[in-house]
Amino acid sequence: MTQPTDIRRDGHRPALLDLFSCSGGIAMGYHRAGFAVDGVDILDRPRYPFPHHQGDALKALARLVASGEIEAYTLVHASPPCQHGCALTVGTNRSRGWGRTHVQLIPDLRVLLDATGLPYVIEQPTGRAPVRRDLSLCGEMFGLGVIRHRNFELGGWNVPQPTHPKHRGRVRGWRHGAYFDGPYVAAYGSGGGKATVAEMQEAMGIDWTDVREELTEAVPPAFGEWIGRAFLTQATAVAA
């Protein structure tokens, strides 16, 4: 198992540390925006398209801060587990007694991110997660086949909120015993008319993994590309 200090970096690009990386959906967007990306995830992610370290993201970040190696990075992105505060967990699942207890990692994560001295991004789905909603993105902003609302807390930098266009219709699938058609697929779960693997890949623009669990947790690359370009544009303007 590699250590964070062993992860290769492209010296010709600004470097992004991608914590809780999963399969690299948002990471691919940052890469397209111009970043060299290093990923960290508790699980082995052989389909992750960039250098990757398997391990506890908080411990890896703490080691990088303590060693000073965090200075090799320009920006840190973190997508901690969302089940503790996401809309599905605090809504339908809780009302029906489904699911289990989940740990909220964001407060400890934020302390470590602040200790890096670097700008950062914390991503979470719509719900009750304890993050500021400095930025909200939706698949309709990018013409995607998923809505995939995501909120982002921006540490040490900011960007104007883009206009949220009106949705073109409903998410296709079953809702409480009724079937609805619509232009978006349900890229989560596995029942009730949820999207197939191929449909999720097409809807989000992800073709390097066909693992259903990875796709249901993925953030579309378009989101990361938008954030990455906004950050680099702002950084270039400040440098000038």
Image (cartoon, grey):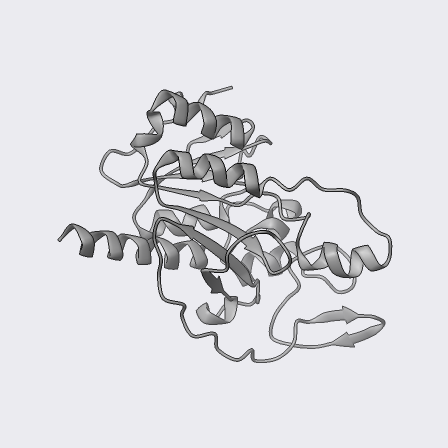
The residue most toward the left is: 240
Tell me the quarter of the picture where residue 63 sits: top left
The percent coordinates of residue 215 (x first, y second) are 60, 50
Let me know if residue 48 appears in the view.
no
What count of labels does the image hold? 0
On the rendered structure, is 217 left or right of 69?
right
Q: Determine whether 17 is above or below 86 in the image.
A: above
Does residue 188 appear in the picture of this structure?
yes
Which residue does the image show at 52% across and 38% down from the upper left? 109
Pick whichever, 69 or 176, lies toward us: 69
Residue located at (66% from left, 52% from top): 85
Q: Determine whether, in the image, residue 57 is placed left or right of residue 63.
A: right
210 is higher (above) or lower (below) than 177 = above
Whole-percent x, y for residue 122 in the image: 48, 48
Q: Is residue 137 above or below residue 231?
A: below
Of residues 174 and 154, the one drawn nearer to the viewer in this rendering: 154
Residue at 55% over, 36% down? 108
> Is 29 situated left or right of 187 in this image?
left
What residue appears at the point 64 percent right and 59 percent down from the top-left corner? 127
Front residue of 122 and 217: 122
Front one among 208 and 48:
48
- The spot of residue 161 in percent (x, y) is 41, 68
> x, y percentage for residue 87?
68, 59
